[in-house]
Amino acid sequence: MRVLLISAYELGRQPFGLGSAASWMQEAGSDVQCLDLAVEELDEEKVKLADLLAFYVPMHTATRIAIGMLPRVTELNPHAHLCFFGLYASVNEEYLRKLGVGTVLGGEFEEGLVSLVRRLSRHGHSADGRQPEPVISLARQHFMVPERKWLPLLSNYAKVDLGDGQQRVVGSTEATRGCLHRCRHCPIVPVYDGRFRVVQSDVVLSDVRQQVSAGAQHITFGDPDFFNAPAHALEIVRALHDEFPGVSYDATIKIQHLKKRMSLLPVLRDTGCLFVTSAVEAVDETTLLAYEKHHTRQDFIDVTREFRRVGLTFNPTFVTFSPWTTLESYADLLNLLTELDLVDNVSQIQLAIRLLIPRGSRLLELTEVKKIIGEFDEAKLCYPWRHADPRVDELHRAVLERVGQGAEVGASRRAVFSDARTLVRNALPADSSLRIALSGELPAQAAPRNVPAMTEPWYCCAEPTDAQMLGGRAAKL
Ligand code: SF4
């Protein structure tokens, strides 16, 4: 069975999911090849030779790119069985079936992939029809160390920029999948529904080891929330630091967990954590309640101050434009970021992120959301929505345009933030007190410091614009 595993995009990382799938399928006796189109061209010969073409879709952008490739790959190889696996496969099952995808595997996909190759080996294409593998599996698997030898070199992927001109080669791994929480806007919830699964620590550490041998100087933990299993996380980072004291890492942790476990921040710092990303999403209580984030504005403020006190870099992310955003709440967010001296910690694209409403989103439970969405857009894999106040959509367009212009000329976070501030100030009514608060220059940074960050700042819960799709990886296809 010749298998071609294809990844389209995963935030600039060498994809754990593709390597994990490769291990399991190799073990099952398949002849495996991999393609990562984020950094490689489509290899037509590999496509033509495959019996099974399996697309890894861990995020929205990757799914749209993979779907965009289907006409080309099926033209090259009309006989291969098509499979989509990863977080966004199951929620888009109906549409994928219409496109001729035979097997859809969401959640813990590895066992399903092995079952698929065995089924195809036994029955060939007569195995097409209703798949026996569960479309969503939450099996507690014993993982295998990802096989990364067929993936491009780590040096081809996004780097971590230390903020002082130096960059480090980045490896990535996962210590858990899924999430204990059920935030309404999160794409993980329709699949894991408040559950998570652990990748065994010996597997994670072996994966780190092989990437350090391959040149990684920094490890990104791709877990949706590193503190869903804090003891597991700490065991891993302590072992990582003991074995590789010069290797840094970053992780994503929600505000609720950071607030509850502030005493662990020094442990992260002392084991080589370079920064922590946290999906703050909003600072107004209305939006936080709508998302069921289970943190407050004050929690965000407290956590920010604790990071600064401990000397660890905080990388907050936001869904800046949502149905609950108002001109005032956007201005308030920028004011708060300024007050907390976080302007340099927020990447430019964060100022223009617009809420994505995919199929299965818990946001569809809300009457106010149902009122503003249109028919599901299959090409964009989401429900289009319009803000009740057209001035907010207009502000979003203007900020996004400014972010795009800034990216072309390499404008700093501070410069783009300053322009976003001007844009919202001009959009606010003349007598608004927020407008007055935003007048004048952006205060200078309280103290010059280097803010480490990934060179690929894209974020998964956002609705990519057509321009971003075409300007990004899809352009290669
Ligand atoms: S937004 Fe974060 S904390 Fe909430 S469900 Fe998703 S991964 Fe979990």
Image (cartoon, rainbow, N blue to C red):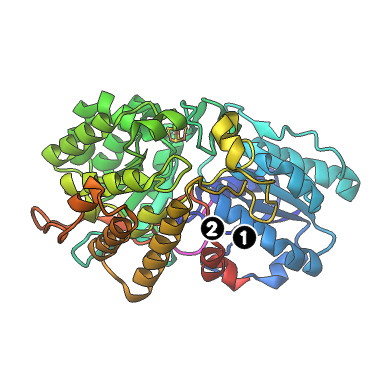
Q: In which quadrant will I find the C terminus?
A: bottom right
Q: In this picture, is 25 found above or below 225?
A: below
Q: Residue at x 33, y 43 (%)?
A: 329
In the rendering, which numbered label is found on residue 65? 1
Q: Which residue is drawn at 22% across and 46% down?
A: 433
Q: Residue at x 15, y 60 (%)?
A: 440
Give, as a single range, the part of the protein colored magenta.
147-154
Q: Which of marks 1 and 2 is nearer the N terminus?
A: 2
State if disc 2 and disc 1 touch (CB < 8 Å): yes
Residue 224 placed where, x, y %? 44, 38
User: Which residue is more in the foreground, 279 or 180?
Assistant: 279
Q: In this picture, is 347 found above or below 303?
A: below
Residue 32 position by quadrant: bottom right
Circle 1: residue type:
Ile
For label 2, the crowd category at 10 Å Cα-Cα, with few meaning under 14, some 14 to 19 and many 20 or more, is many
Circle 2: residue type:
Tyr
Residue 341 placed where, x, y %? 16, 49
Residue 212 placed where, x, y %? 35, 53
Question: Which quarter of the frame holds ligand 1?
Answer: top left
User: Which residue is more in the foreground, 391 or 24?
Assistant: 391
Q: Does residue 33 appear in the picture of this structure? A: no
Query: From this viewpoint, which residue is outermost toward the front?
Result: 431
For label 1, the crowd category at 10 Å Cα-Cα, with few meaning under 14, some 14 to 19 and many 20 or more, is many
Task: Judge left or right: residue 165 versus residue 457.
Answer: left
Q: Residue at x 64, y 54 (%)?
A: 380
Q: Is mark 1 on a helix, strand or loop?
A: helix
Query: From this viewpoint, which residue is outermost toward the right?
Result: 126
Q: What residue would you read off at disc 2?
A: 9
